[in-house]
Amino acid sequence: MGIFSKFKSGFKRGANALQDAVGKVVGRTRLEESDLLDLEEAFYQSDFGVETTEEIIERIREAHRNDENFRGEDANALAREVLRRILEGSEGKLSEKPDAVPEVICLVGVNGSGKTTTCAKLGYRLKQNNSSSLLAACDTFRAAATEQLISWSDKLDLEIVSGHHGADSAAVAFDAYSACESREYDRLVVDTAGRLHVKDNLMDELSKLKRVLQKKNSAAPHHSWLVIDGSTGLNVTEQAKVFHEKFGLTGIIVTKLDGSSKGGALVSIFRTMKLPIYFIGLGENADDLQPFSVDYYLDSILPEVQKDF
């Protein structure tokens, strides 16, 4: 399956209601107030958020008032235009080969966000792009996390450093970095704990892990990415703020978008956090972690409509 096909398939559930609402007005030369209300409701239900939805609907209303040739498909074009502007700068770019090795990527986030599977899928993606990577199982608080990452690494033929349940996560990170150096790997991908219900303890643990890594390399971690469950929509704002304040985030990975009807959550998340989106999760398979593309995203949730002159 090609990359665009993965986007289209992954966002299918979140795009259906929105495309249905737009489809009802395509071909019309005048829009009724009920049409605009239907469009507005569809954007809200897709979790685009208040600001984005109001901006899109206001642009459509204004154009509808001022242009006697305005047609339903123009509403679609205006919505795409607004979303493209909001998403400007949202595409995170990871070079195939880092400038300095090993480059450290830390994945943080609450339990249930898909962090551990994302760690394995990211390692697999790097491997497919000829960038060697080592996984570090530093969520030692949750025994299942280490077992899960080991299982994934076995299945995908990835190297991993892990510790026993309850081990010092910073010590595991230190050992993993040392292994990365000695084996001359390009990147170290670190899975961390995510028990936000004991927030202070978690943040202390993450701070220690960061300090230990910086003893090995003062620039580490080079990337600190928050892994977000896309199906939760805007509910991630507060947790993101905590992680950003305590750990310092440089980017985002949004997971589980294939199972969500909230295709607009990604826009809301970027608009709120202003951090680049490096990857998105569009399915269960190892190759369903894909680099974020504004073009593919817009064409998946709100395809262009050709005017019929």
Image (tube, rainbow, N blue to C red):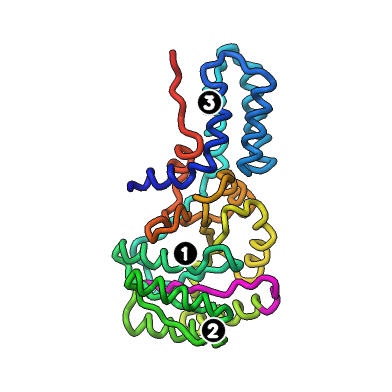
- Residue drawn where x is 47% and y is 78% of the image: 147
Tell me the distance, in whole angstroms, between the alpha carbons under discs 1 and 2.
Answer: 20 Å
Tell me the distance, in whole angstroms, between the alpha carbons under discs 2 and 3.
Answer: 53 Å
Residue 141 x %, y %: 58, 80
Q: Which residue is mark 3?
A: 23
For residue 218: magenta?
no
- Residue drawn where x is 37% and y is 68% of the image: 99
Say which amino acid is labelled 3.
Gly
Q: Which residue is mark 1?
A: 118
Figure check: 302 above or below 218: above
Figure check: 75 above or below 225: above
Say which amino acid is labelled 2.
Ala
Residue 23 x %, y %: 53, 26
Disc number at residue 211? Answer: none
Residue 222 x %, y %: 48, 70
Between marks 1 and 2 in the image, the one whose residue lies nearer the viewer: 1
